[in-house]
Image: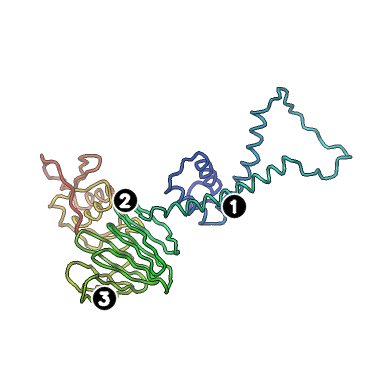
């Protein structure tokens, strides 16, 4: 039975062949090379199929050379069968040694490519995403990080601490335990310190939101007389100018659902929900005041603002007007068309 990769229609072998062809065509960006490395590391089956592709290539390529670069005009299509006195196993020929050597070289080359991808991924220690772009990757200490759109995160790992600077956007961290090196996220308004936990940090214009799903983190400020605040799983703080922040209990899975490209709303206003989509996507939503105060309850795809607007329109007797490729208006169905061009709703602070 054919093995299928990640539930998609392509088999592991087909994926391996596609990666192999693109790699040999020099058609992979740095980000795609890192994705290739992650795909290889995801399963031994991925590596096995890739090595089989390499072996097949090593056999077929010399045959291609023989067929297309031979100087003989009378290439025979007759294959000599062995005679009785030729029953002994044939000695290893120069060609067989060539194939074995090439297979070995391809395997070594594959490992070198993987090492090169891992190294190049962190030559530039800054992770930066654009609108409508989500990324997940492993840090060099084994921690995992998922970043949302419009995020800039800089890796400043050292021997005594694992420091990351969040300049903008949002990130979810699954921290590998290392008691000798604390894991620190500096978002300017707030500094989050952990040793092994799962938490998210969202940096906005005038505030930083820290949400803990598992474990415990310490939130502090780089100011005198600012006592640190400890928050645990299922808790959240919003750090603004005043200190200390109020610790509140939240549904952490719902608050951090953006990391899986979902947005979950529990009686939020339509205006606030639209602002969450606008914060992350290239397509912006304009909400008329008549609909903005309505409440919305449900889960939506974070990277599909059009479907969100259409769902709200169907539930609230509204209509979606596509004013340009990157701008849509959500308004009452009986609202008169406006003469002035719409402006997108600014994300909530």
Residue 282 placement, left or right of 42: left
- Residue at numbered disc 1: 48
Residue 231 placement, left or right of 272: right
Q: Mark 1 or 2, which is nearer the eye?
A: 1
Q: Residues within 10 Å of mark 1 (few under 14, many from 20)?
A: some
- The quadrant in which the C terminus is found is bottom left
Along the line of sight, the residue nearer the viewer: 104 or 129: 104
- Residue at numbered disc 3: 228
Helix, strand or loop at label 3? It is loop
Residue 327 drawn at (x, y percent): 22, 43
Helix, strand or loop at label 2? It is loop
Q: Are marks 3 and 2 in contact (CB under 8 Å)?
A: no
Q: With respect to residue 17, does 114 lie above or below?
A: below
Q: Residues within 10 Å of mark 2 (few under 14, many from 20)?
A: many
Residue 240 drawn at (x, y percent): 19, 66
Mark 1 vs mark 2, CA separation in Å: 34 Å
Along the line of sight, the residue nearer the viewer: 298 or 100: 100
């Amino acid at each position: 039975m054919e093995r299928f990769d990640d539930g998609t229609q392509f088999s592991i072998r087909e994926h391996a062949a596609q990666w192999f062809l693109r790699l040999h065509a020099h058609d992979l960006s740095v980000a795609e090379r890192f994705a290739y490395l992650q795909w290889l590391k995801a399963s031994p089956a991925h590596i096995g199929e890739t090595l089989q592709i390499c072996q097949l290539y090593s056999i077929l390529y010399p045959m291609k050379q023989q067929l297309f670069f031979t100087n003989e005009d009378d290439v025979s299509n007759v294959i000599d069968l062995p005679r009785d006195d030729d029953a002994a196993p044939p000695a290893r020929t120069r060609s067989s040694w060539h194939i074995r050597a090439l297979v070995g070289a391809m395997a070594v080359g594959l490992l070198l490519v993987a090492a090169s991808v891992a190294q190049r991924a962190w030559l530039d220690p800054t992770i930066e995403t654009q609108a409508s772009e989500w990324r997940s990757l492993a840090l060099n200490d084994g921690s995992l990080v998922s970043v949302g759109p419009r995020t800039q995160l800089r890796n400043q790992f050292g021997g005594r601490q694992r420091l990351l600077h969040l300049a903008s956007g949002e990130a979810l961290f699954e921290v590998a335990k290392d008691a000798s090196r604390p894991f620190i996220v500096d978002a300017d308004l707030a500094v989050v310190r952990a040793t092994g936990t799962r938490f998210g940090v969202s940096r906005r214009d005038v505030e930083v939101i820290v949400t803990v799903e598992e474990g415990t983190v310490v939130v502090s400020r780089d100011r005198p007389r600012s006592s640190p605040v400890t928050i645990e799983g299922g808790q959240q703080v919003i750090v603004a100018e005043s200190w200390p922040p109020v610790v509140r209990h939240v549904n952490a899975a719902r608050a951090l659902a953006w990391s899986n490209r979902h947005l979950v709303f529990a009686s939020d206003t339509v205006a606030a929900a639209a602002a969450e989509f606008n914060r992350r996507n290239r397509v912006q939503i304009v909400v008329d005041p008549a609909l903005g105060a309505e409440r919305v309850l449900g889960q939506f795809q974070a990277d599909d603002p059009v479907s969100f607007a259409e769902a709200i329109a169907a539930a609230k007797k509204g209509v979606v007007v596509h004013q340009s490729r990157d701008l849509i208006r959500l308004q009452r169905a009986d609202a008169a068309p406006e003469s002035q061009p719409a402006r997108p709703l600014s994300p909530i602070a």
